[in-house]
Amino acid sequence: MMSRSVNSAFTTAAKVKNERGYDMLLTGLGLGIALGFAMQRGRFCVTGAFRDLWVTGNTRWITAFLIVIAVQSVGVFTLDAVGVISLSSSAFPWLATVLGAFLFGFAIVLAGGCATGTYYRAGEGLVGSWLALIFYALFSAISKTGVLATGVSGLRSVTVEASTVHGLLGVSPWLLIAVLASAVGLLVRHHLRKRPGARLATLPPRKRGIAHLLFEKQWGAFTTALVIAALAILAWPLSWATGREAGLGITGPSSNIVNYLVSGDAEVIDWGVYLVIGILTGAFIAAKGSGEFRIRIPDAVTTVRSIAGGALMGIGASLAGGCTIGNAMVNTASFELQGWVAFGFMILGTGAATRLFITGPSKARSARNAAAAGSSSQTATPGPNAARASVRR
Amino acid sequence: MAVHVLETDGQVCPFPIVEAKEAIALLDLGDELVINFDCTQATDALPRWAAEEGYPVTNFDRVGDAAWTITVQKA
């Protein structure tokens, strides 16, 4: 296989890699492909879940998100109990978490997707998401290992001596899991009961058999959540086996890719890097296979928002110690204070940006339209698209 | 009864649904709103919105790669 004549530095590096296991790293790629596929086909969008709370008050997608946390929680603490992984904790950097999470929640509205959402929409061919992704990865690296690293680690050194919710309360994590699972169960029951009376319109099927199941059938929010929860649990032991002692994570790996590209140092390529490349690949496969891939060029406003959103996401996630996945979906499952505080402040940040960029402008247009309708029905204030809106009679 | 067309191609979610709500508010009962969109998530969000509002959907189809159209009647 490997020639004995290669230089010793290279063999040493290769030996280190082999100890961690190249084939083990490939499990990250496989899991990422499955995750990207599930997110694209299931239309799983965390930004959408948070934003719906502020736009419509709808809790269907946040319920799906909570299902992932609750199910993953059972998995994580079981893996910990049987010794496959061992959860450790450090002091809670409360100040950076609060600031970073609010900033991240704000930024994902601008970018039109959180970290994973941006990865999978990039795989669907949205050029706005390509830009958001590039700036997110770049500013993650700038914040973690670049010129902003000193400031970020300075803010993250402001800590309190508590790390987990169960540690703080002095209770068993299983009690918290029981409480969370019950609450999520009630929410799920509420949503399953209030299914809309009118039948949900669906696209006419064009595929049959396995192709229909994989590339056409609508998954449903809660089914998607269960698939993602299973993958999130599986991520723990697979990542652990390669020496990366964590569950799903997006920001660190994105920063590592930038560091690898500019330094050429292959040592920064870990399981997480394979994971995020897998997400992009899996989403592309899902989108291409279902006729949902197309290169889509954003308009000027969306372009600027995607770039600004991506950059702020990188800074926010680095400050908070994780994105909507690493913090709000994974650190919550292990009941870390950082995860739950970040979850809350991300939702607040999303609310602020939603009011500023979505519901505020929309209300203003509707109010002008209503006033205009009083005088003449033909002078409605146009929305962003009204130039292209038309009336056929 | 009039048919109104709302083009939201190129707009990411939630703008298709936000604009659909604004547009349908201006319609008369019985009027139809054709919403053309290319945000994948809206294939989930728009039919669900119509069902929850009690608006009949008279057409829902693909018009090309990552391009869809849905017709919602104000009721």
Image: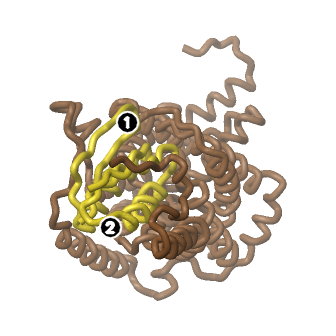
Q: In the image shown, does A263 or B75 lie closer to the viewer?
A: B75
Question: Pointer 1: what residue?
Answer: A286
Q: Is residue B29 visible?
A: yes
Chain A: its colour in the image is brown
Residue closer to the observer: B65 or A240? B65
Q: Quadrant of the N terminus of chain A?
A: top right
Give the colour chain B carries in the figure.
yellow
Disc 1 marks a residue whose amino acid type is Ala
**Above or below A337: residue A323:** above
* Residue A145 versus residue A99 in the image, above or below: above
Secondary structure state at the residue bearing disc 1: helix
Q: Is residue A228 above or below residue A40?
A: below
Residue furthest out toward the front:
A376
State the residue at coordinates (51%, 36%).
A125
The answer to whether any part of residue A347 appears in the image is no
Label 2 marks a residue whose chain is: A
Report crowding for label 2: few under 14, some 14 to 19, many 20 or more residues within 10 A (C-alpha). some
The first of marks 2 and 1 along the sequence is 2
In the rendered structure, the answer to whether residue A173 lies left or right of residue A328 reads left
Rendered view: A98 above or below B16: below
Q: Which mark is residue A60?
A: 2
